[in-house]
């Protein structure tokens, strides 16, 4: 299968990192941020907060989505990511192939040409952008088998521990849009202002410290995929 070939081309597992998520209901981003800043690891904000936008692609039988729902230990996700405005002229988009192997994940990225996300945007135009970009042939062949499934957007803040071993992101204001192969109005959407997603990221060498790290949080680790959540919100 092409997906297996792509997975085999991903980076070595030694380069993967842990990404542990918590879905927090009934609390604002500010309240979650205060809890993060009270952690004894001394988290401070890094980078500027920003909006993140993603276009997800999947096979016609939604195999990447179902692999995630079924909890397969080795799975793949494909998205186009950019920052800032959702619609209009999109600068510096990046194509990401993201893989999960058990509890660790990694990704490989390819810069894409700019494009305009409007009612004339189509899968055909995006495939042309892929062809003109510097993407290895095996990835191009896999992309030809994919279709649009979801457009999403959220607001992210970044934090890092004082020893630089742990990073936390907090995402809020989730928006999910249905995305067709052509003729999109971007009017059909679902919005989630009731929850935040906290994600802890750390290297494999810090795995032994992770459990004691979480003991300071009043949250329970949960399985969470923004892609799966978006599909379920829009298509259920």
Image (tube, helix red, strand yellow):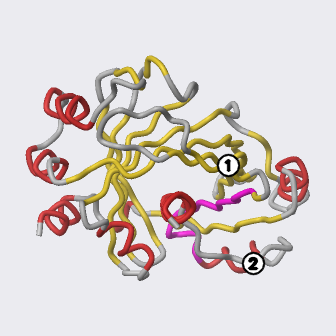
Residue 117, above or below 136: above
Contact, mark 2 vs mark 1 (Cβ under 8 Å): no
Horizontal arrangement in the rendering, residue 75 relative to residue 203 (left or right): left
Q: Which one is nearer the viewer's eye here, 156 or 168?
A: 156
- Residue at image coords 79%, 51%: 43
Where residue 220 is drawn, which disc sits there? 2
Q: Which one is nearer the viewer's eye here, 229 or 135?
A: 229
Q: Where does the image place residue 75, in percent across and percent down from the top left?
A: 33, 70
Question: Could you say which quadrant of the image residue 64 lies in?
Answer: bottom left
CA neighbours of label 1 inside 10 A, class few (<14), some (14 to 19), many (20+): some
Asked whether 206 falls inside the magenta stretch, the response is yes
Of the residues tagged 2 and 1, which is closer to the observer?
1
Residues in magenta? 196-207
Question: Could you say which quadrant of the image residue 15 lies in?
Answer: bottom left
Q: Which one is nearer the viewer's eye here, 64 or 16?
A: 64
Residue 208, above or below 79: below
- Residue at image coords 68%, 54%: 168
Horizontal arrangement in the rendering, residue 118 relative to residue 86 (left or right): left
Q: Where does the image place residue 148, in percent across and percent down from the top left?
A: 33, 47
Q: Is mark 2 on a helix, strand or loop?
A: loop
Asked whether 180 falls inside the magenta stretch, the response is no
Reading the image, the residue beneath label 1 is 191
Q: Which one is nearer the viewer's eye here, 164 or 182?
A: 182
Q: How far apart are marks 2 and 1 (CA)?
A: 23 Å
Chief secondary structure of the magenta portion: strand
Q: Where, quadrant-wise, is the N terminus in this rendering?
A: bottom left
Residue 36, above or below 183: below
- Residue at image coords 54%, 29%: 86
């Amino acid at each position: 299968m092409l997906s297996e070939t792509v997975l085999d081309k991903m980076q070595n597992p030694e380069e993967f990192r842990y990404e542990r998520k918590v879905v927090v209901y009934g609390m604002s981003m500010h309240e979650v941020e205060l809890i993060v800043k009270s952690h004894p690891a001394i988290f401070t904000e890094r980078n500027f907060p920003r909006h993140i936008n993603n276009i997800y692609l999947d096979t016609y039988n939604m195999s990447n989505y179902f692999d995630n729902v079924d909890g397969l230990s080795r799975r793949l996700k494909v998205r186009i990511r950019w920052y800032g405005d959702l619609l209009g002229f999109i600068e510096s988009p990046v194509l990401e192939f993201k893989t999960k192997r058990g509890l660790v994940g990694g990704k490989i990225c390819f810069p894409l040409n700019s494009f305009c996300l409007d009612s004339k945007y189509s899968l055909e135009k995006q495939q042309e952008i892929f062809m003109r970009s510097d993407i290895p042939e095996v990835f191009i062949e896999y992309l030809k088998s994919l279709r649009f499934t979801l457009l999403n957007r959220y607001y992210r803040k970044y934090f890092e521990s004082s020893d630089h071993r742990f990073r936390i992101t907090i995402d809020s204001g989730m928006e999910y849009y249905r995305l067709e192969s052509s003729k999109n109005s971007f009017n059909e959407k679902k919005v989630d202002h009731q929850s935040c997603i906290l994600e802890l990221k750390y290297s494999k060498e810090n795995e032994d410290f992770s459990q004691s790290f979480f003991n300071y949080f009043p949250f329970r680790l949960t399985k969470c995929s923004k892609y799966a959540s978006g599909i379920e919100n829009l298509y259920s």
